[in-house]
């Protein structure tokens, strides 16, 4: 029970820190838009690009695990 409570408190603390950083990025992007810069328009595309790589890696590891699991079950049943 103690470990779960510790994990929950650490998770909530990290989440608050990340939320404040997002606000800082948003404020910086809004200020650059007010100045006429078009670079802030690309911030959403950059976020999507940065998230694609970890998602593809996680999905491929999951698919590899499922493939190996099915292969092992077929060898055992044979």
Image: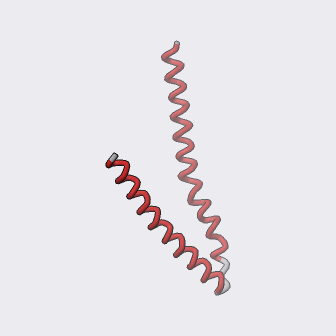
Q: Is residue 69 above or below residue 77?
A: below
Please report the residue visible at 53 percent of the width from the left and 47 percent of the height from the top. 57
Q: Is residue 6 above or below residue 39?
A: above
Please report the residue visible at 57 percent of the width from the left and 57 percent of the height from the top. 51
Please report the residue visible at 38 percent of the width from the left and 52 percent of the height from the top. 7
Please report the residue visible at 55 percent of the width from the left and 42 percent of the height from the top. 60
Q: Is residue 22 above or below residue 77?
A: below
**Residue 15 locus on image (x, y percent):** 46, 62
**Residue 37 locus on image (x, y percent):** 65, 82
**Residue 65 locus on image (x, y percent):** 51, 34
Side (left or right) of 8 relative to 43: left
**Residue 59 locus on image (x, y percent):** 56, 43
Side (left or right) of 65 relative to 41: left
User: In which quadrant of the rendered view does residue 34 lie?
Assistant: bottom right
User: In which quadrant of the rendered view does residue 31 lie?
Assistant: bottom right
Q: Residue furthest left?
A: 2
């Amino acid at each position: 029970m103690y470990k779960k409570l510790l994990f929950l408190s650490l998770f909530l603390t990290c989440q608050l820190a990340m939320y404040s950083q997002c606000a800082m990025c948003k404020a910086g992007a809004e200020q650059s838009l007010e100045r006429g810069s078009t670079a802030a328009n690309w911030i959403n595309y950059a976020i999507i690009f940065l998230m694609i790589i970890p998602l593809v890696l996680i999905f491929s590891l999951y698919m590899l695990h499922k493939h190996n699991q099915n292969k092992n079950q077929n060898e055992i049943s044979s």
